[in-house]
Amino acid sequence: MRSSIVRRTWLAGAALAAAAGVLWLGGATLPAAGDDGVIRGIVQSDAGPEAGVWVIAATSDLETVFRKIVVTGDDGRFLVPDLPDADYEVWSRGYGLIDSTPVAARPGDDVELAPAVATDPRDAAAIYPANYWYAMLEVPDAGEFPGTGPRGNGISRQMRNQAEWVDRLKDGCQLCHQMGNLATREVPNLDDYDSTLHAWEQRVLIGATGAGMNAGIDRMGRERSLQSFASWTDRIMDGAVPPAPPRPAGAERNVVLTQWGWSSERGFIHDEITTDKRNPTVNANGPVYGVDMLGKLAVADPVRHLAFELDIPTRTPMDRRGTGYGAPTVAPVPSPYWGDEVVERTGPANPHNPMMDARGRVWMTSTIRPRENPSWCRESDHPSVERFPLQRAGRQMSYYDPEQEEFVLIDTCFDTHHLQFAEDADDTLWISGDSNVVGWINTRLYDETANEQASQGWCPTILDTNGDGRAGAYVEPGEAPDPAKDTRINGFAYGIIPNPVDGSVWVARPYPNPVPGQLVRLDPETCLAEVYEPPFETDAVPPEQWGHGPRGIDVDRNGLIWTALGGSGHLASFDRSKCALLNGPDATGQHCPEGWTLYPTPGPQMAGVSAAGSADFHYYMWVDQFDTLGLGADVPLVNGTTSDSLIALVPETGEMLTLRVPYPLGFYTRGLDGRIDDPDAGWKGRGVWASNDTIANWHNEGGKGMTSEIVRFQVRPHPLAP
């Protein structure tokens, strides 16, 4: 289905440009760089020049929010490059300092910033990343698990070990927004409640997502969880502060950040895309796309500094739950920001993840119809239906064609969530999101025929536990093993990546057993699967090398699989070639610890955690296969979703670099990718892109009125490179 009517909603000041006739594809007058396009200067406190301090240059003269952020060198000097001609406010922020007073400047100016040294620990700690604050929350001792329930120690009986409780603290509480930022660690209106415990009992019910938060607390153990949060808040509001983070050092000082606003204040950007993962020169200097779960495609032009949104269509009129028009949601507890007004977090199309193809089309997972599948998905002679019929799907597929300015909707029998293109002749699009199967679309065939049924297929995940090398009769999940049969496994397939070396497809399954969680390898030719779990509760490695909670997944050019272990706080690689055992009755997860290498990410450990338990949360990850950032090819990057950062690992040295976004505090990332705009322009012609993807922009520094920004990360040769 094609939708020829595309409606733009201009964002920020972009409506002025639209009224003036400035269109997306033509004729805009670009702000020229003033003088040499840079603002230079020094950051100097009473203690002398300040190294490793951020300098923020922001302007409201353009059609979007626009900021440029750099870091000072050893001598406290800075250079903000490539600035459009505009009036800027320039100020500094650094650990151990009070933010400097903004100074008015224009490109070509040389300024001095004079921050004061922080003498009060609370003033200094106000700008620390959220993970430093979240690490202060006290986790129940490992000896208190498994939980004994509400009449025992208040920990749910579902919590079999401390790692499961930590996983819920992170994946359960941080799946939507950052924990540990000012909006979550304190209760500014505490006088409205009987106690801090009462405040926490109420705040987990707030807003359209309150029911989900409340259910998560119940799963952990309501009494003990709320007591932990209330005690954490009390200690912080009484003056407790975390230790200071280190300032940027080494290559971290070479980072240049550029930010463009691209959502409304209520917008919920979930993921972004700038190029084709297989060829990062696609869409060079072109628009950046993001999916807003309210049912919109966000578009930002980083050259013209414009941003707008497009409504993503559906085939059937639906409410936000995809079940037809229904009654509005009622907020269980009023929001301190919005009162009784309900701020919806999803719209009818409910898009989740975008990906770009070689033609610059933006493919995305989105809802196009109600959940019940058409009859052909349930009973037909389609090969995949004969293999494993599917009854329902919550999301399907669509793509936006910028050249034609139209959306195309594609029905799928399987649920969809993340998507990745394979490097094959069919431009196969592999898609996660179903708990029972892994699905795909042959996009070459679809482009030729527009036949959505013939172009799609799926495989259930079947382990060759009888070792005969083929997918035969199997026992169902949870049934007793049968040595004569294979075994079907299931679980929510979250991240997905095709391996360019051997053609296999890998998915990360963090649910229903996030501790330890699974990586599943699928052979598309045979529909046979293999399962590998991070080492956990095993004598094969020490406890500090136990990992859990795989979510994001990617691959390097050599076929090495990488994953983010959001629960334990690791970036991990998995090398299947090291495994002595691949299938058979014993190949059910914990059979290849030798294939895993775990890298603990920087930052503090959760208080009271005896094994791995970083306070940071790693929502997803991405491998920079083509050196779009400038740190080298095949460098993996993981989201520091609780640390306002991207974290890069240089595999040759094992060094981890924290690429911090210091303003606005609350930078919460999900998807990311890298693009090469000009391969001959050095560091200026390339960059990695990520956006602020929190469910609640009003939780960020600045409060109500803040929006999402798309951020380009670049690494220059040194802190003063123009």
Image (cartoon, helix red, strand yellow):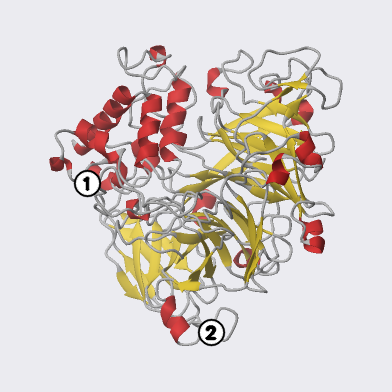
Instruction: Look at the numbered disc 1 and give the secondary structure of its residue.
Output: loop
Instruction: Look at the numbered disc 2 and give the secondary structure of its residue.
Output: loop
Disc 2: CA contacts within 10 A as few (<14), some (14-19) or many (>=20): some
Q: Is residue 605 above or below residue 557?
A: above
What percent of the width, then of the height, locates residue 617?
47, 38
What percent of the width, then of the height, locates residue 498?
74, 44
What amino acid type is highlighted by mark number 1?
Thr
What percent of the width, then of the height, locates residue 382?
80, 43
Give the quadrant of the C terminus: bottom right
- Nearest the viewer among 397 and 587 is 397
Q: Is residue 242 above or below residue 3?
A: above
Q: Is residue 384 above or below residue 324?
A: above
Give the quadrant of the N terminus: bottom right
Q: Is residue 624 visible in this depiction of the protein?
A: no
Q: Is residue 558 visible in this depiction of the protein?
A: yes
What percent of the width, then of the height, locates residue 213?
37, 37
Identity of the residue drawn at 57% across and 17% down: 542
Q: Is residue 119 above or below residue 256?
A: above
Mark 1 vs 2, N-terminal side: 2
Q: Which mark is residue 28?
A: 2
Q: Label 1 to label 2, Cα distance in Å?
A: 49 Å
- Nearest the viewer among 155 and 596 is 155
Residue receiving disc 1: 119
